[in-house]
Amino acid sequence: MRSFAILVLATSANGLTQEPPATRCYLIGNSLTWDTVPPLLSGDVQWHVDCGVHLPFIHANPEKPCVKESTLWPTALRDRQYDVVSVQPHYGSTLAQDVETISAWMKLQPKAVFVIHSGWAWHAQPDLNSRQR
């Protein structure tokens, strides 16, 4: 019994019973990203939220996001390594532009898992001229 107690103390002293560090997350997107309420998410969470604009716009114009509490992406992705980076595409850019932009961010965060946070697609509009009367 005595050797078991020593083993448990040694294991605790080596840090094997410590909690893992908080997951470091960074979110890039627009108002739908802000609707996830990043300040209330668990873990170490930062964000760059600019309302109503697409990812290439955010990439090219990082200086004045609509959410003033944002940590600007050039500083965040340069100064820290995140575990997860979530990006939210938005209307106004092409798939190729989004891929190029996300790929640039991936180069800055080679160890991060990237998550595409897609919004709702446009619903098809009925062609009112094709209805028979």
Image: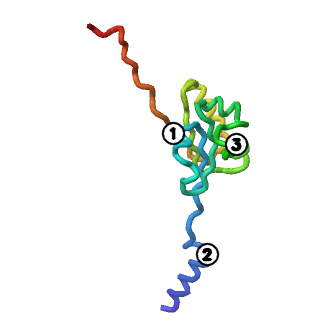
Residue at the location (73% across, 44% down)?
A: 75
Name the side, left or right, on which 80 lies relative to 91. right
Residue at the location (55% across, 86% down)?
A: 6
Residue at the location (45% across, 32% down)?
A: 120
Name the amino acid, label 2: Asn
- Look at mark 3 in the image and give the residue it sits on: 72
Q: For residue 54, what is the image quadrant?
A: top right
- Look at mark 1 in the image and give the residue it sits on: 117
Crowd around label 1: few <14 · some 14–19 · many ≥20 (10 Å): some
Q: Position of residue 15 (x, y in %)?
A: 60, 73
Name the amino acid, label 1: His
Name the amino acid, label 3: Leu
Q: Where 18 falls versus 98 (above or below)?
A: below
- Look at mark 2 in the image and give the residue it sits on: 14
Q: Marks 1/2: CA distance?
A: 39 Å
Closer to the chain start, of discs 1 and 2, is 2
Q: Position of residue 89 (x, y in %)?
A: 55, 33
Closer to the chain start, of discs 3 and 1, is 3
Q: Marks 2/3: CA distance?
A: 38 Å
Dot 2: element = loop
